[in-house]
Image: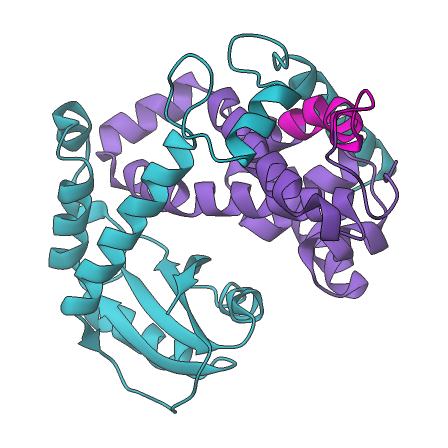
Chain colours: A cyan, B purple
Amino acid sequence: MNGATPEFEDFISSELDERAAQVSVDGPLARTAADIVAVGNGGWTWPGGRVVFSTATALVLVLAVLALWRAERPVSVEPVSGGAATTEIVVWLEPGFSEDEALEVGRRLIGGPGVVSAAFVDAEQTEADFRGYFADEPELLDLVDPAQLPLSFTVVAEGNPEIYADWAEQIPEVAAAQYAGRR
Amino acid sequence: MSPSRALSRDSRSGPTAFDVLFQEEYAAQVRRAFLMVGSEEAAHDIVSEAMTAVYRRLDELEQPVLYLNRCVMNGCRDWGRHRTRWSKLVTSGLSPERATAETDQDRVDLAEALAALPYRQRAAIVLRFYGRESEAQIAEVLECRPGTVGSLIHRGLAKLKESLS
């Protein structure tokens, strides 16, 4: 039992309603059906000149670059099987584990459903990855103690990545498992 | 409500089926996306991309609203997967003094607790308790079994309760 009473569920509903009601749906950020039609027929910018899909596209591009960068520097744990139609899942460990402890968790992670391989992202790589991503935000970099960044694994698995993510999140040392793209 | 199959994009005879779909869905989808990602700008971008995808395939979609729901939630997942990774790093990488100070200053509220949930638990909670969707409808959007939806909601509520207590 999660102990969530009907009263708690009502509380969640009313809080979500209240928060959603604060969103402006017809302000300067809003698009019209005509905007969508213009872009859908081949346009590249929303009216006003803003490049279409700026936020989402930028994030996807950053993710793609990071994925390529990681792929060039994998620290392999152990390939388990071969196969096609694989996806990549990033598994973050809770912070505070040593690399040896993390590798022990990694040996459990490769026992999950559909796993083809798992690459350990060590502390050095995590810090470099982080510094590269936030290179334009030095104030943020100053706030972060690199030693506290959590370690992670990049797992390649066959089949629905959500099944593996759900499985991995049952492991106590795992903070989160996130689908990160097709392989 | 779901517009019927084989919707027309032809605007020569007045408002098109796409216009109707847009009017019925845009605001609600933006609000839903906002609850998922916590950014109004991102919510508008995500829903606009989803609406564009629907517009381009409107003639062939049997259930355009279901397709729109999936596009929006997938957009939220794709937007969040990288951002969440690094916000998790930033949060856990704060110096102990700084982290303690921030914890003391800012009580965890529902938005933060929701943002900390894994994507599928967050999606199930938003669809169930904001969208008032049934478990069967949520299963269609998330493309999983209804039993899985029940488990996602159960675990999501437990984590929210823990975070908010």
Q: Is residue A104 left or right of residue B136?
A: left
- Residue found 32% across the figure and 67% down from its top: A154
**Name of the residue lying farthest toward the bottom:** A81
Picture coordinates of residue A120, whole percent (x, y): 24, 70
Along the line of sight, the residue nearer the viewer: A103 or B50: B50
Picture coordinates of residue B71, whole percent (x, y): 61, 45
- Residue found 39% across the figure and 31% down from its top: A55
Q: Visible in this render: residue A31? A: yes
Picture coordinates of residue B112, whole percent (x, y): 52, 30
- Is residue A133 on the magenta stretch? no
Q: Main secondary structure of the magenta part?
A: helix
Picture coordinates of residue B5, whole percent (x, y): 85, 48
Q: Is residue B72 left or right of residue B8?
A: left
- Residue found 44% across the figure and 19% down from its top: B106
- Is residue B28 on the magenta stretch? yes
Please report the bounds of the magenta region as a residue range. B11-31
Q: Does residue A103 sit above or below B69 in this rendering? A: below
- Residue found 46% across the figure and 21% down from its top: A46
Q: Quadrant of the C terminus of chain A?
A: bottom left
Along the line of sight, the residue nearer the viewer: A14 or B107: A14
Q: Quadrant of the N terminus of chain A?
A: bottom right
Q: Visible in this render: residue B113? A: no
**Name of the residue lying farthest toward the front:** B12
Q: How many marks?
A: 0
Which picture quadrant has residue A167?
bottom right
